[in-house]
Image (spheres, grey):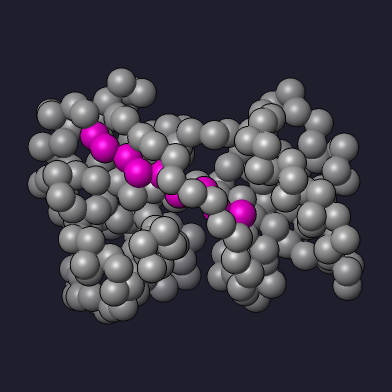
Amino acid sequence: MALDEIRVSCAILCRFWVKDKLLLLLNRNRRAQGIYELSPLGGAIEAESQSNVFVRMKLNPENGNSNDLRFFIRRSQLEDFAKWFYQRKEREITPFRELKEELVEEARLLPNLQMSDLTWQFLYSYEAEQVTQREGVEGVWTHYFLEVFEVFIQNSWLEEILLKVDSASGALLVDERTARNHTNIQMYVDGMMRTVRLNTQSLFQDRD
């Protein structure tokens, strides 16, 4: 990474409601490092496959085999990228792909998930900068572009499955007050009780 470059990560985060509780998942990347942190559902925003934004804006992708909007860019170009990002074109603008990936393919909390099983509403975007703990780029100063959605499950059968979620799966239902405090809680996971950090402050930027 050149001295005048900064890492950028674009992500969708979800207030995923199951009845009156928020569903959170252990961050898989940090869990693999022995760090236990509950985070909102969501993940990297992808550029559309036909988009040439990486070439056009001279973005240096973190993973050349992925359309994830995680990349390095010159700081002088950050404003131009922000203008493109907020147009909400040539990229994902819904949380469905990431939700299905997390709930069905990764955590395996649900047997399947269709778009009709959910409703969602875009709430707000915001930016932040901090050091990333993501494996492979630990310690790198990162500029985040985040979009927050409110998501409700409409399928009563799938809702019942999630209401019975076991913390050993890496998932936990918490009330809004607990999530807003974003401190530490005790959770039984990976064979023992552990102190788990709540990484939920991003979900309530519109309410603080």
Report the residue at 18% width, 53% height from top: 21
Q: Quadrant of residue 88?
A: top right
Q: In front: 146, or 40?
A: 146
Observer-nearest residue: 99 or 28? Answer: 99
Asked if residue 162 lies left or right of residue 123, the reply is left
Camera-side residue: 107 or 140? Answer: 140
Q: Is residue 196 visible?
A: no
Horizontal side of residue 147 vs 3, given as left or right: left
Q: Residue at x 41, y 58 (%)?
A: 206
Across and down, in percent, residue 94 comes to: 48, 33
Q: Is residue 147 magenta?
A: yes
Residue plotted at (30% across, 68% down): 180
Q: Position of residue 170 (x, y in %)?
A: 28, 57
Judge by depth and name the residue closer to the eye, 145 or 206: 206
Residue 141 visible? The answer is: yes
Q: Is residue 40 left or right of residue 172?
A: right
Is residue 196 depicted above or below 126 in this figure? below
> Overall secondary structure of the magenta stretch?
strand
> Is 22 on the left-hand or right-hand side of 33?
left
Looking at the picture, does residue 120 appear above or below residue 123? above
User: Start and end of the magenta stretch?
Assistant: 145-153
Residue 202 location, x and y as percent? 44, 62
Residue 193 among those drawn in magenta: no
